[in-house]
Amino acid sequence: MKRRDLIKYLSVTPVAGAALAGDITSLHAAPQSLAGAPKKDYFSELGVRTFINAAGTYTAMTATLMRPATLDAIKYASGKFCMLDDLQDKVGERIAQITHAEAAVVTSGAFAALTLGMAGILTGKDPAKVKALPKLEGTGMKTEVICQKAHAIGYNQALTNCGVKIVMIETVEELEKAINPNTAAMHFLHVQSDSGKIQHEQWVAIGKKYGIPTTIDIAADVPPVENLWKFNDMGFDFVAISGGKALRGPQSAGILMGKKDIISAARLSMPPRGETIGRGMKVNKEEILGMMVALEEFVAIDHAAEYKVFQQRIDRIKAAVETVPGITTKVSHPVLGNVTPTLNITWDKTAIKKDGNDMRAQLRQGTPSIEVVGGKDNLSVTAWSLQEGEDKIVAAKLKELLVWASA
């Protein structure tokens, strides 16, 4: 299911998956604390429902499961003090090296990365401008960001939080006409690039022609792993990505990477500095170090082997549900975002008496509880958030559900 098909879920965000090369069989083994199994079942004591995640890394579903090495880094950082800026400096250098960026910083998610990057473009290193945001009137800061109509999504509020106005265009002619002395940036959304009339390279080229910074949101758009550096190499001035999806970092972490002057200016609006637009976008030392390690782990895995495992799991679920009369299945392979085998299940309404909402509720209320997505007329399943063996459970429960729905 493409991100653009899930805009109605604006409070959540898709994607997840990964495993270290050579450890594919335990692709999603449940992480444990360094001391072994937890001493208490906290969620059970609190009455919090846990579930098998056959949907994806939606924010509302607490996104992803971190790898053991990331948890090790978080535990390590939790036992020591350091200066926040020192850690961001060193981690940023390491992330920039991996991603081919001039500079990078760990943020509190992709949304925060967009806001902070926009702030850096607007304010530069002027302390008075940093303090003024989101008030732009009378400050000398620019006020407009150009975006293609096909790239207009709710997440662009991350930019307007800085006080700018989004100017929508469709063609190259409209773009060049819209550029004016108040144009602060030209913003691009990778996951919907196939819907726009202007593609990445031309977007960047026009930005360079007129001296306008170009920015890109790739929040959920790895794998492929090459996207981590592709857009930096292409010349975008900043790139924003989520850390809590396929990278399997802390859910509340993200990365802002790009040109050194923009990243350093963006950091003036970040904690530990106060009286800034980004003061509430705090990211702690545990998340910063954990995000770095999660990125290192992600670039080291065998992505082809991982994808093969996901495909095998989807095939197992598909084979099970297809035994129910009236069921039609289709496996899609998104290429721009949420790149994982995705099973879509539809049905003959004369054979299946329940709608998708009823069936999702039944899965949610069952034992074990299972989450999938979809609408009234379909169910959609992915495998990259499943732990070892859970695909067999999902296959059996979906088949049981569809038999029940046909009775």
Image (cartoon, rainbow, N blue to C red):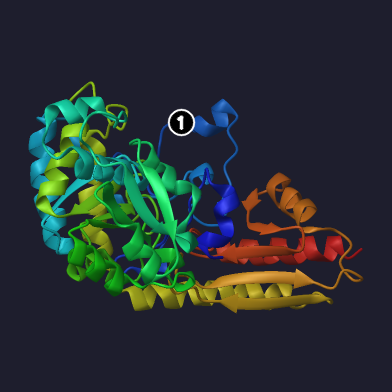
Task: From the viewer's side, name the closer residue of 263 and 332.
Answer: 263
238 lies above or below 116: below
Q: Which residue is mark 1?
A: 40
Q: Is residue 291 at least partly visible in the picture?
A: yes
Image quadrant for the C terminus?
Answer: bottom right
Disc 1 packing (10 Å; few <14; some 14–19; many ≥20): few
In the image: residue 174, left or right of residue 389? left
Residue at the spot 10% in from the left edge and 48% down from the top edge: 261
Residue 211, given in percent of the width and then of the height, sits at 17, 59
Residue 239, given in percent of the width and then of the height, sits at 26, 56
Location of residue 33 by image quarter: top left
Task: From the viewer's side, name the closer residue of 13 and 191.
Answer: 191
Residue at the spot 72% in from the left edge and 72% down from the top edge: 321
242 lies above or below 165: below
Secondary element at tag 1: loop
Amino acid carrying label 1: it is Lys
